[in-house]
Image (cartoon, coloured by chain):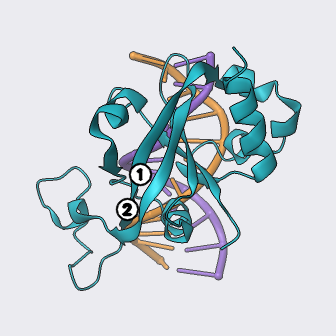
Chain colours: A cyan, B orange, C purple
Amino acid sequence: MAKRCWLVKSEPETFSIDDLAKKKVAGWDGVRNYQARNFMKDMRVGDKVLFYHSNAAPPGVAGLAEVARTAYPDPTQFDPKSDHHDPKAAPNAPIWFQVDVRFARKFPRFLSLDELRGIPELADMLLFRRSRLSVQPVTDAQFKAIVAHAEDV
DNA sequence: GCCAACGTTGGC
DNA sequence: GCCAACGTTGGC
């Protein structure tokens, strides 16, 4: 697998970078989009993960995590009480998967979506074109540009 | 809170 | 297999 960098979105009201910092490792459950799921299945332990705050004021990249465990069935799909329950899924036929992510660090500078849009190296970023994709690959060059800006204090 | 974009569902 | 209706995401 060539891809090594990803961007994942979370609504900070639900689960923020600070929540991950406290928890250290978290299961990235609740993804219910096939394309996002397929990207998670491509993730390998140690892959870099940009933590993006969506539906926030402002939205943007808050920090860095890494993949701690490769894809395994998301248990919330089997739980009728969960918001993420999927009646079509069964333990012997899971539909949805999650990975575990480990906190790496919070960036010294939060990079807002507005600011990301202004970085020339990111002109082709999926984030701008596929605004609803919650797990997406990031190229090495894009990743480096984001980290460089986030640490340029 | 609004609404545009877009993914999913279901009738045909 | 098309496409209208519907639901959700996410920026503003």
User: Which of A98/A108 is in front?
Assistant: A108
Kindly tell me whether residue A12 is visible in this rendering: no
Q: Name the quarter where the N terminus of chain A is drawn.
A: bottom right
Residue A152 spot, x, y in % from top left: 73, 19
Q: Amino acid at mark 1?
A: Val
Residue placed at 74% from the left, 25% from the top?
A149
Residue placed at 55% from the left, 17% from the top?
A58
State the mark number for residue A98. Answer: 2
The residue tagged with tag 1: helix, strand or loop? strand
Taking B9 as reference, is A151 above or below it? above
Residue A13 spot, x, y in % from top left: 34, 26
Taking A101 as reference, is A50 above or below it? above
State the mark number for residue A29. Answer: none
Q: Which residue is mark 1?
A: A101
How many neighbours does mark 2 have within 10 angstroms: few (below 14), some (14-19), or many (20 or more)? many
In this rendering, the count of numbered labels is: 2
| Residue with the most extreme left position | A81
Q: Is residue A127 left or right of residue A72?
A: right
Q: Chain of mark 2?
A: A
Q: Name the quarter where the C terminus of chain A is drawn.
A: top right
Q: Is residue B11 left or right of residue A36?
A: left
Kindly tell me whether residue A143 is visible in this rendering: yes
Q: Amino acid at mark 2?
A: Gln
Residue A120 spot, x, y in % from top left: 88, 32
Residue placed at 26% from the left, 54% from the top?
A84
Q: Chain of mark 1?
A: A
| Residue with the most extreme right position | A120
Q: Nearer the viewer, mark 2 or mark 1?
A: 1
The residue tagged with tag 2: helix, strand or loop? strand
